[in-house]
Image (cartoon, rainbow, N blue to C red):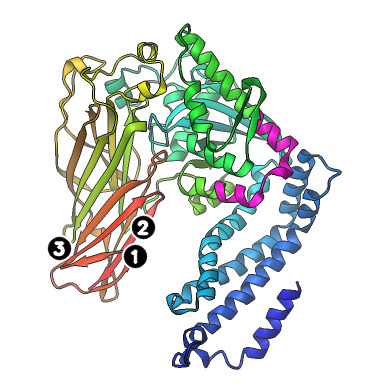
Amino acid sequence: FGVRGDVVTLKAETAVFMPLTPYLGWVPKVGPTLVAAPHFMEMADAGTETAAFAVRGLKPGLAALQNDQLSSDDRLSQLVTAIDAAKPDLNQAGVSLARVAAARAAITNADDQPAQIQSLLQLADKWLPLAQDMLAFSLVAPEMMGINGQQRYLIMAQNEDELRPTGGFLTGAGVLTVENGRIIDLNFRDSYGIDNFKKPYDDPPAPLYDFMTLELFAYRDANFWPDFPTSANKAMELYSYGRDVPPLDGAIAIDQQFLKLLLQGTGPIRIPAAETTINANNVIATLQSSWELGDEEDAATWIGQRKSFFGDFASAILQKVQGDFTSINPVAMAQSGYEALQTRRLQIYMANPNVAAVLDELNWDGRLENPSGQDFLMVVDTNMGFNKANLLMDRSWKYSVDLTSVEPTATLDITYQHTGAASDTPCFQGEVAELYKETPAYLDIANQCYWNYLRVYTPQQSTLLQAGRHPVPNDEMLNGNGWDGEMSQIEDLPNWTAFANFFRVPRSETTHVNLAYTLPASVVQQTGDANQYQLQLQKQAGTESDPVVVTISLPENAELIAFSPQSAKMEGNQVSFTLNLTTDTNISITYR
């Protein structure tokens, strides 16, 4: 609070000069700093105000964390209670932090500042988004941790090596029970043990039957839609139905890479039942080895052992949090969790509408949202080969938009490269039990042909013009019927038009998927005397970092006024962006 007082005094004493400093850019050496001085002062004022509110509100919780007389469980509970009581202060801290962000955005000459100031601005750029999001999240975290009553959440464990729309095949399910800031229980089971097929089950979505011959809509296939709330609701419904338990309060989806990030925050975790210690460096290999069939095992034994391993892993994590919470580095944990949320390694859906609204605003819920008046593109794969081929698949795409006429058009070229070893064995979807019996090593399970049901999500009212064909012969298909390879236009989610096709990529080969379609005229918006085109590229959960090239052709003689990101290249009337899609990305162009 002493620093806060010093900043308030400095602001008052320099207030008379601040209106003049933006005109002093000519002063040698310090000119750029003087130009930005009002914004630096605003950042200092608002930043110390943020800290003052946050520290005052969280002081009881911080004291609980440092109380050696309390158990780890009690410390966590008291921290959650303190956060709940601190909501007024945390609200004010959020308002102050928004002032910091606005002042930072107003500094347009950062590259001209001295090295030390540039370093501080880079730190601000790194931590500001995380701090803003964490403050917003803190307002609903107590509710999620059961401050107002017990909450039960479905943990959807996904394997991204068998890519599905929300991140990967649902290998397992856990139920996390929390109440009054305490973790009451965390149990886990294999996804094959969820459903009760003595009961009647609905038919699955048509593609699951048409291409995989699945006759019942089971839990393990619940994440059919890339909109996570839609898939989460179905998974929660099927879990409750199969296990005969009351409705759940939310769902949390994780994948293997999330576990790696989690262990970066928690540090190594000992699993006594497996006689091993898992850390961020070996967790993926350990998970993969748990999938492998031993020489004397059958499929039933294998499934049981997977269940045992995942349960032991969940128990070890719970023990770490309950018994050794203070050993966890909170900064490292926050960084890891934030990265997981930004990259969709972690997705959270809550049934409580107030909590859901905050998660939606933070973009942590995996929801497909396409504000009207802009372009949208999401490439969604569904591995239908009963294998782990995505471990060996590289995907990249080129997206071109033509704005030279009244009716915008788009072309998309997606490249799939299978990096596995070549094989003389013909592609065949096969039956999963036989496949695992024949190929006990995880890499062998991965080095299979890639069978993919592709959906490309675009703005509503887009219309398919043409697309390449990808036929599959009868003898390669599990159903024996073959596939004509024609792309179709579908609407399986409200507010989007999707284009769908099914194809396979043989081992060590490359396949190109091409399509062209019209876009609604509303993707170009008039703002005064200028036009604005915006594109939202949405990352599919479970993917690493698709290389993407976006090229926009502007009308002849158009004047480019502004663009974002700043890495754009201009050649003639074409603006191009080259990026790696590690997270959702927005592209904006203003021209006249």
Amino acid type, callout 3:
Thr
At x 35% / y 39%, what residue is drawn? Answer: 493
Provide residue 248's location: percent of width, then percent of height. 59, 31
| Mark 1–mark 2 CB contact (< 8 Å) | yes
Q: Residue 239, which numbered label?
A: none
Question: Between marks 3 and 2, how big is the CA–CA gap?
Answer: 21 Å
Q: Which residue is mark 3?
A: 404
Q: Residues within 10 Å of mark 2 (few under 14, many from 20)?
A: some
Q: Quadrant of the C terminus?
A: bottom left
Q: Residue 25 at what x, y percent from top left?
A: 45, 90
First of labels 1, 3 by sequence position:
3
- Left or right: where 481 falls relative to 430: left
Q: Residue furthest right?
A: 69
Q: Amino acid at mark 1?
A: Ser
Let me know if residue 441 is in the magenta part: no
Q: Position of residue 212 (x, y in %)?
A: 31, 20
Q: Which region is colored magenta?
A: 316-337
Mark 1 residue crowding within 10 angstroms, few (<14) / some (14–19) / many (20+): few
- Image position of 180 (left or right of 186): right
Residue to which mark 1 is pinned? 564
Q: Earlier in the sequence, mark 1 or mark 2?
A: 1
Whether tag 1 and tag 3 are in contact, CB under 8 A, the answer is no
Which residue is found at the position 25% from the left and 18% from the top? 428
Give me the C-alpha separation between circle 1 and circle 3.
Answer: 20 Å
| Residue on which the image places disc 2 | 586
State the image quarter where residue 513 is shown. top left
Q: Return the residue nearer the eye: 222 or 556.
A: 556
Question: What element does badge 3 sit on?
Answer: loop
